[in-house]
Image (cartoon, rainbow, N blue to C red):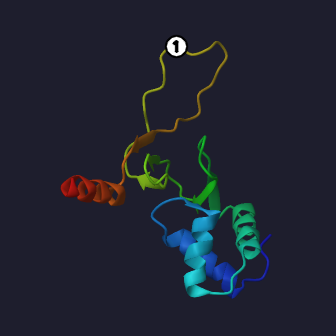
Amino acid sequence: MRHRTTKQLETIESILRDAARPLAIAEIHAAALERLPRLGIATVYRAVRELSDAGSIVSVIYAGQPQRFEWAIARRHSHFICDTCKRVFDIDAPSNVPLPQKRPKGFLFQGDEVIYYGECRDCRKGSVKEEARS
């Protein structure tokens, strides 16, 4: 059940909908502060919980990473984790990896998830600049 819409909720919803990648609470808060300078972190947590309860956003959790949230979309997709800055990005790559031929007896596979690791464009630009200085 959705509560009344507030300027804060609309702002946070807009940030998540327009993001090209899953965002951590701190990233959502930082982006929202640019539009609403007095926005408290507790408001961000409440809005994220409300959007999650409504099914508008989903949680993205990877070991060693903060919990992130992204707009719920119908298609499955892969993610890329930058080893340098630790940001997570959506990747438009097929995530339909063939399932193993041999399964444990009685198991039913219902999906998969592909995670790519490396260095993002922003961090690579920084690395290239550092290498050029050496």
- Work out whether 10 lies above or below 70: below
Q: Is residue 71 visible?
A: no
Name the side, left or right, on which 125 lies relative to 96: left
Q: Count neighbours of disc 1 (C-alpha within 10 A) and say few if under 14, some if 14 to 19, many if 20 or more.
A: few
Name the residue: 58% across, 74% down.
Answer: 30
Name the residue: 48% across, 20% down.
Answer: 100
Name the residue: 52% across, 13% down.
Answer: 102
State how many labels appear. Answer: 1
The amino acid sitting under disc 1 is Lys
Name the residue: 38% across, 52% down.
Answer: 92
Identify residue for label 1: 102
Residue 91 at x, y = what percent?
40, 51
- Work out whether 70 lies above or below 18: above
Name the side, left or right, on which 11 lies relative to 120: right
Q: Quadrant of residue 110?
A: top right
Name the side, left or right, on which 69 lies relative to 130: right
Q: Quadrant of residue 4?
A: bottom right
